[in-house]
Image (tube, helix red, strand yellow):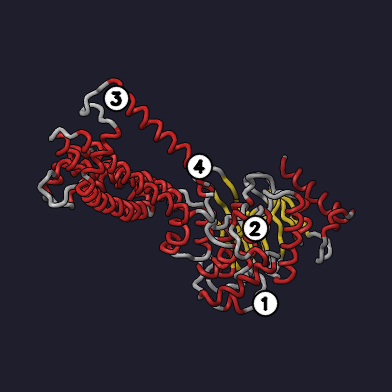
Amino acid sequence: MLWRYVPPIAVFVAVLIAWQAYAVITGAPAYLLPKPLAVLRSLVADRDNLLSSLGWTALAALGGFAASALIGVSIAVLLSTSTILRRAFYPYTVFFQTVPIIAIAPMLVILMGFGILPVVVCAFIVSVFPVIANTLTGLLSTDPALVDLFRLYGARPVAAMWKLRLPSALPNIFTGLRISAGLAVIGTVVAEFFVGEIVRGEGLGVRIVSATKQGEPDLAFAAVLLASLLGLTMFGAVNLISHFALRRWHASEQ
Amino acid sequence: MQEIVTSPHATGVGIEVRGVRRVFDSGVIALDGLSLNIHPGEFIAILGPSGCGKSTLLRLIAGLDKPQSGSITIADDPDTPATKAREHLAYVFQDAHLLPWRSVLDNVALPLELLGIQRGQRLAPSRQAIERVGLSDAVDRYPNQLSGGMRMRVSLARAMVTQPRLLLLDEPFAALDEITRQRLDEQLRELWLAARMTVVFVTHSTAEAVFLADRAVVLSKRPGQIIADHTIELPPNRAGPIRATPEFARQTRVLYEALDRGQT
């Protein structure tokens, strides 16, 4: 079982070694190409501050992701109930996907103040569309024969939604959530760039900006590394939940 | 709604189809003025080439679709067929169409659940229906752990769990191999002999129609018109080997000839 983790870890280690070797041989300056070992060193040296930042970023990313899951699925459920609603509103949900978040983030901060709220909202905006789109696809591709069967026994629309449409859309919902988990972290870090150092809790995005300004690229990279690991962890958690929810019946988890 | 479960000997209902016309949005005329009387408790097979409107007829009887003109009355039922009759009606599709996230038991219990019957009262009839199709060992299994034939038997059990007075089947075993299909045909015939509900069985197989039904109606190609209404003259109890008797062949021949007439 554990053998399956060997290839990806081997690739990871090989890339780090090659990177370190390249940086040492070419003598590239640290602000262009920090050495992995140096990044590791500043990660350990500054661990208290970094971990506290990771906590803030994780909180905001989880908040945005939870909002995406809840609101995204609800919007999709609503849109799936009526062709007219779908025609009227679905095109505008695409805005979530296309809005240039870098341009929007400062406005959100001005609008909502320098707290965690604009950060969560930003994470939500970036990560909600994949949930809506995938859930809607799942809800609309319910087996028509089963829809007929439910109709035949006089099932109410709410029962058909709970007992038929939502469960059959579950594999699609998880696909959306998987994509959304990583995006929520990206949205969080981008928003944190603009929140600045005024907030009490400084997220990883704040660290990245300040470390870069102060000429500490190793520290900035350490923060980037933590943000990536956070995204990876959230992705993994969604995968795990998906596995347990679907393993009995869906081919993707067997 | 409770009486569906508790009345053990509900008998079949009669169906009167009068001048039914159904034109699809595409302009295709599926049925044009079809009339047919189905007697209570009868096992009738509807036979015809692909696209002759036989599935459309079944959907109309089930109330899943509405005709442009004409009427369908489910007799022995004081209310309109579209609403109340549903509790007495069951439908089996071309494939099993089970809920993959539910066990066999929960799949079979689904109709009772949708009709609003309490959890405690769903168990006994569901187990009984599963037993009748010979799947008692598989109650806790999931559909993807079953063979195609077993899945179809679960589908049959799900249809029978409400003790329907009218059972509609739309080429239910067409996707199965020959041997499995014959076994299921035998099982269905036994179910009917025990319960005596009205059965409308749509098929494109003459042999299946002869083995199962007491009456076979042959439809022409679209729009479907009745070209033969044939009473199958075979004993009520039919075992597998009856398929090899001269009498069986004679009955099959009548239907083949009717199908040929419908082609021209």
Q: Nearer the viewer, residue A205 or A175?
A: A205
**Counting residues from the N terminus, which is met first, the one under dot 3 or under dot 4?**
4
Q: Nearer the viewer, residue A131 or B257?
A: A131
Label 2 neighbourhood size at 10 Å, few (<14), some (14-19), many (20+)?
A: many
- Judged left or right of residue B153, residue B250 is right
Distance from Cα at disc 1 to Cα at disc 2? 21 Å
Quadrant assignment, res A103: top left
- At horizontal 65% and vertical 67% (from top left) the residue drawn is B130
Distance from Cα at disc 2 to Cα at disc 4? 48 Å
Host chain of mark 2:
B
The residue where tag 1 is placed is B9
Quadrant assignment, res B86: bottom right
Q: Residue furthest right?
A: B246
**Counting residues from the N terminus, which is met first, the one under dot 1 or under dot 2?**
1
Rendered location of residue A247, percent (x, y): 51, 54
Mark identifier at residue B191:
none
The residue where tag 3 is placed is A24
Host chain of mark 3:
A
Q: Nearer the viewer, residue B85 or A13?
A: A13
Rendered location of residue B179, percent (x, y): 77, 52
Distance from Cα at disc 2 to Cα at disc 3? 75 Å
Distance from Cα at disc 4 to Cα at disc 1? 59 Å
The residue where tag 2 is placed is B169
Q: Nearer the viewer, residue A120 or B178?
A: A120
Same chain letter for marks 4 and 1? no
- Judged left or right of residue A66, residue B179 is right
